Amino acid sequence: NGVVDAADYTVWKDSFGETSRLEADGSGNGVVDAADYTIWKDNFGSSTTELLAQSIPEPVGMLWGGCFYTSCFIVARRTIR
């Protein structure tokens, strides 16, 4: 329904310990466990759009890292010649 609520707790409780029904696996570790309860508790009352906005990392760091690595490779290659 787009909101973290008591119904989500029921899904977690009913599937606790499962490794095949992973609707309540908020941590993504492949098992419904206490870590998923903590995620539910911390996000209780939040909407999924709020959660998505929080969990999408920006790829800028990877871009800068790739540029740095490429620059180092080019400089090292020119130095060897």
Image (tube, rainbow, N blue to C red):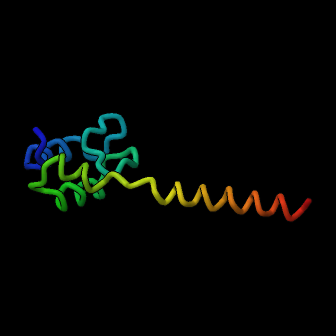
Task: Locate residue 79, reporting x and y percent.
Answer: 86, 65
Task: Locate residue 66, reporting x and y percent.
Answer: 60, 55
Compared with residue 23, is residue 33 higher up or lower down, i.e. above or below?
A: below
For the point 83% across and 58% down, the residue is 77
Quadrant showing the C terminus = bottom right
Residue placed most toward the observer, 79 or 63: 79
Compared with residue 65, is residue 18 higher up or lower down, i.e. above or below?
A: above
Q: Residue 30 occupies which quadrant of the picture?
A: top left
Task: Judge left or right: residue 22 versus residue 81.
Answer: left
Compared with residue 16, is residue 20 higher up or lower down, i.e. above or below?
A: above
Q: Residue 58 occupies which quadrant of the picture?
A: bottom left
Task: Locate residue 27, reporting x and y percent.
Answer: 33, 52
For the point 35% across and 34% down, the residue is 20
Give the residue furthest to the top: 20
Question: Total label count?
Answer: 0
Task: Judge left or right: residue 75 versus residue 70.
Answer: right
For the point 80% across and 63% down, the residue is 76
Compared with residue 73, is residue 19 higher up or lower down, i.e. above or below?
A: above
For the point 22% across and 52% down, the residue is 51
Quadrant showing the N terminus = top left
Task: Locate residue 35, reporting x and y percent.
Answer: 30, 58
Give the residue furthest to the right: 81
Q: Residue 34 occupies which quadrant of the picture?
A: bottom left
